[in-house]
Amino acid sequence: EAGVTQFPSHSVIEKGQTVTLRCDPISGHDNLYWYRRVMGKEIKFLLHFVKESKQDESGMPNNRFLAERTGGTYSTLKVQPAELEDSGVYFCASSPDPGQGASEAFFGQGTRLTVV
Amino acid sequence: QKEVEQNSGPLSVPEGAIASLNCTYSDRGSQSFFWYRQYSGKSPELIMFIYSNGDKEDGRFTAQLNKASQYVSLLIRDSQPSDSATYLCAVKAGYGGATNKLIFGTGTLLAVQP
């Protein structure tokens, strides 16, 4: 079974440009999460989809970030326009449990975003 | 105060020894606790979860939880060089979709010396 897949694995863009990250969760997983780790800091929650609906977007830093999950399958995270402080590793995770108990979240390998 | 605190390390142990990784959390309402292992450049991989006070064992790994002290730990017995990685402690606030997010510590780097 394929795991959580993220594209691209690495992206280098200039400040002010737009970048779109993609996440393909494990097939059948209703829950999809985006997290981010900036240099030297802990992994931080960005948002949570249940199917195509945003369940919790309390971690989104500002309105330059837009996440979508059309059809409840793959998700995209767009940063427009990118700023230097957006650099970091963006992780996607998915889980099959709609929210009860200690369900396991499977993580992708991340997209390393560098804004120069 | 950080929500989840870990010593960043590195924690260096000789091969065959017990590695002890510690984590404290600030939210008394936290219900579920996770240990992830992350090799450099790879995805975090879940090794243990625990949500009841006491010990939970799985092979060479034991997770320990003390909710009164807001403390969770991971013991790795018979440490191997392949255990060298960053160990991330993560906490989930409660049950239900609105609080399903994980709150991570910064991770502890473990180095097992052959």
Image (cartoon, coloured by chain):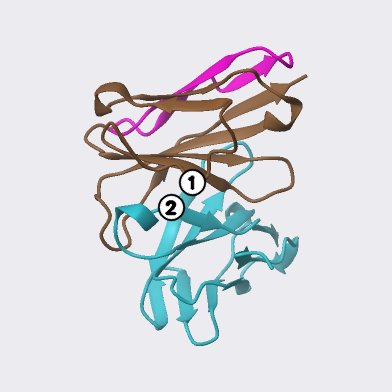
Q: Pointers 1 and 2 in contact (CB under 8 A)? A: yes
Does the magenta portion include A4? yes
Q: Nearer the viewer, residue B79 or B10?
A: B10
Q: Which residue is mark 2?
A: B101
Tell which residue pokes out farthest to the front in this image.
Answer: A63
Q: Which mark is residue A104?
A: none
Q: Is residue B77 above or below residue A30?
A: below
- The answer to whether residue B77 of the structure is visible from this angle is no
Judge the density around disc 2: few (<14), some (14-19), many (≥20) Cα neighbours within 10 Å: many
Q: What kind of residue is marked 1?
A: Ser
Q: Position of residue B101 (x, y in %)?
A: 43, 52
Task: Identify the residue at horizontal 69%, vertical 68% (top origin).
Answer: B1
- The residue marked by circle 2 belongs to what chain? B
Q: Position of residue A25 (x, y in %)?
A: 34, 32
Is residue A58 in view from this perspective? yes
Give the residue pinned by disc 1. Answer: A58
> Considering only vertical position in the picture, is B54 above or below A102?
below
Image position of B57 (left or right of B87): left
Other residues around mark 1 within 10 Å, as few (<14) / some (14–19) / many (≥20): few
Q: Position of residue A19 (x, y in %)?
A: 58, 16
Which residue is at a point 66% across and 21% down the rendered structure image?
A82
Name the colour assigned to chain B in the rendering: cyan
What stretch of residues is rendered in magenta?
A1-26
Instruction: Report the amino acid beneath label 2.
Output: Lys
Residue lying at 61% horizontally and 34% vertically, measured from the top left: A89
In the picture shown, does residue A12 fall above or below B90? above
Which chain is drawn using brown?
A: A
Seen as rendered, the residue at the extreme right is A116
Residue B106's image quarter?
bottom right
What secondary structure is marked by label 1? Answer: loop
Residue B10 versus residue A90: which sits nearer the camera? A90
